[in-house]
Image (tube, helix red, strand yellow):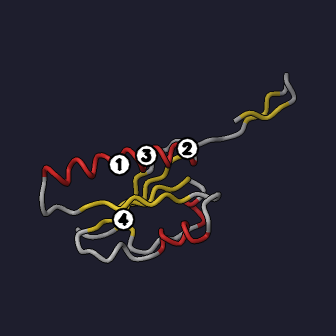
Amino acid sequence: PAGSILLFLTGQEEIDRACRMLDEQDREQEHEHAGRMTLEMIPLYGSLSAEAQARAFAAPRGERGVRKVIVATNIAETSVTVPDVKYVVDPGFVKQTTYNPERGMEAL
């Protein structure tokens, strides 16, 4: 069925790596399975430009048979509603700071 996929990961580096890996896999599959739906990887995190972030909220590229895969930080989980999302993948990983009283410091 049609609809975008929203994948939550913990940070920019992980998101960029996942987008690259998924894009490579999608290109390999494209040659093996003609006529299948292709994927458009869209990273979404705070340090992206407003223009790059807006891609997550836009319609997929003009071609038919393209599914958006928005790969976002879990901060977007509570603060953003992306239209057309039908599938959500949340592996449950979280970057959380903790306080170490022996060192008097917070750590990630």
Q: Which residue is mark 2?
A: 13
N-term mark: 2 or 1: 2
How many numbered discs?
A: 4
Q: Are marks 3 and 1 in contact (CB under 8 Å)?
A: yes
32 relative to 76, above or below = above
Q: Which residue is mark 4?
A: 68
Residue sitting at x 28%, y 46%: 25
Q: Which residue is mark 1?
A: 22
- Rounded to the nearest whole Å, what is the CA distance between mark 4 and mark 1? 12 Å
SS class, disc 3: helix
- Rounded to the nearest whole Å, what is the CA distance between mark 2 and mark 1? 14 Å
Instruction: Kindly identify the amino acid type of the residue bearing the numbered disc 4.
Output: Lys
The C terminus: image quadrant: top right
Crowd rating for badge 3 (residues with CA inside 10 Å; few <14, some 14–19, many 20+): some
Instruction: Kindly identify the amino acid type of the residue bearing the numbered disc 3.
Output: Ala
Q: Is residue 34 left or right of residue 41?
A: left
- Rounded to the nearest whole Å, what is the CA distance between mark 2 and mark 4? 20 Å
